[in-house]
Amino acid sequence: MIKFGTGGWRAIIGDDFTRENVQLVATGILKYAKELNKTDKPIIIGYDRRFLSESAAKWIAEVLAAGNIDVWFLNRSAPTPLIMHTVKDSELYFGIEVTASHNPARYNGIKVIVDEGRDASQEVTERIEELIEETADVETIDFDEAVASGKVLYLRNPFNKFLDDILALLDTNALRERGLRVLFDTMHGSGAYPLQVIFHTTRCTVDTINLNKDAYFGGIMPAPTEQTLSPLSDMVVKGNYDLGIAMDGDGDRLGIIDKDGTYINANQILCMLYYYLVKYKGWKGGVVRNLATTHMLDKIAESFGEKCYEVPVGFKYISSKIDEVDAVLGGESSGGLTVRGHIHGKDSVYAASLFAEMISVTGKSPVEIMKELEAQFGVFTMVEDNLVFAPEYKETVNKIIMVDKKLPEFRNKVTRVNYEDGCKVYFENGDFVICRFSGTEPLLRIFAECSEKATAREYVDAFKVFLKL
């Protein structure tokens, strides 16, 4: 069965990610577009640099063209934010990106983008799943034939408007005057080209590593974590760079290395950028985070007389809430964020550029900015465990925490429990721990945040012991 998660449909190549299943998904999207009578505009198809991504994009195009929907196709890999931007800017109904984002190399997948460049909602993906289930036959037309007939059109210079819109949002003069030296770990991903263009345009010196296409991502997860960015950290220090930057495979998750080699995690990036936009650029508005993201954002927002809004995991919830409350910024601890006035999805090209602007304007390193925030708002330390479990045990865990609503014995007082997305336990002293199933991988994720790492570890371990994991 083909099921969409929080980041689209993802599957293991050769097991479930096959030509047959890819074209079933494409047929479901085609039927959904026809059901809504939204076939008079093209559907743009993009793809990352994973194994089979370009081929899969062509398989999808063959289905859409056979169904008499025009296709805009790219002649090179592209990050997911570009597809979102094009859907929004060109007022398209749909966009498709072939990607498994930060998942291991054995995965690939399909992300569906809808009106205004948003992540497809759960209601949309559930309807597509139903239409896939009802599909008996798949009609296709040969890709080259579709190109020759004009049903598939290769876009020329698809990055231009995306890049120009980001540059228009930046303080390019500050970046030019500062002249940062940046080491960019592209992680073999599709976000390499646009960020290089922005840095070269703003007169930054940018060197790259892992720029080549590698279906195995150098043997590591294409996710900008402290562990995967250890080599980048060493090279930043040895090369005397001002900043190290990394993105995941499809350019929607960001990692930062300070000039001293310190890894700056996603929670810290969110806090620094929100603080910068409000304090230094004078923006007004709250901030949005998912329920597994740092509560330091709450403290920062409160200090400006603003509010921090908590939503379930899934970026569609963040972007919707940003629109609803006109928030400045929204993001998640896994490394994705967006800023008001840009696209409705995660974009590490803009986020990385804005982070470089912040360093240029303030004249402070990320570590220095973070120390200022901790002095004002306190220390917030997060511990996270990702646990692999036998498929049959998922039902058991779900019954314990979501049906029976049982909890471990904690030594600190529990004030409330939120079951909106997994099980989140809030403590009297402001700490929290959350236990939830991943929406993109077969993992149980347990997060805890408090002022001391040892206490956060205690919360996580309590859940692991309680669930016998």
Image (cartoon, rainbow, N blue to C red):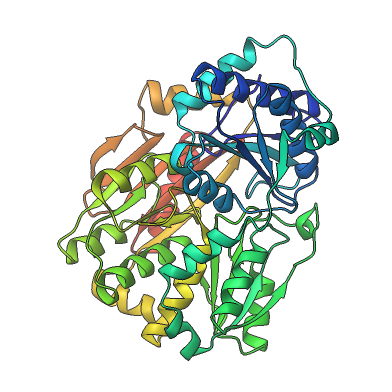
Residue 257 position within the rendered picture, expressed as x and y whole percent measured from the top left = 55, 74
Residue 140 position within the rendered picture, expressed as x and y whole percent measured from the top left = 78, 22
Q: Is residue 97 visible?
A: no
Q: Horizontal placement of 451 versus 233: left or right?
A: left
Residue 199 position within the rendered picture, expressed as x and y whole percent measured from the top left = 58, 76
Q: From the viewer's perspective, is residue 410 above or below residue 93?
A: below
Residue 230, image quadrant: bottom right
- Closest to the observer: 370 or 51? 51
Residue 53, image quadrant: top right
Q: From the viewer's perspective, is residue 113 above or below residue 368?
A: above
- The residue that appears at 25% across and 65% down in the rendered structure is 300
- Closest to the observer: 307 or 170? 170
Q: Is residue 113 visible?
A: yes
Quarter of the image with the N terminus is top right
Quarter of the image with the C terminus is top right
Direction front: furthest residue: 149
- Closest to the observer: 26 or 163? 163
Q: Horizontal placement of 179 versus 170: left or right?
A: right
Q: Horizontal placement of 148 versus 346: left or right?
A: right
Residue 403, image quadrant: top left
- The residue that appears at 67% across and 36% down in the rendered structure is 71
- The residue that appears at 18% across and 66% down in the rendered structure is 303
- Closest to the observer: 357 or 61? 61
- The residue that appears at 77% across and 32% down in the rendered structure is 59
Residue 464 position within the rendered picture, expressed as x and y whole percent measured from the top left = 50, 41
Q: From the viewer's perspective, is residue 115 above or below residue 33?
A: below
Direction left: furthest residue: 305
Picture mark count: 0
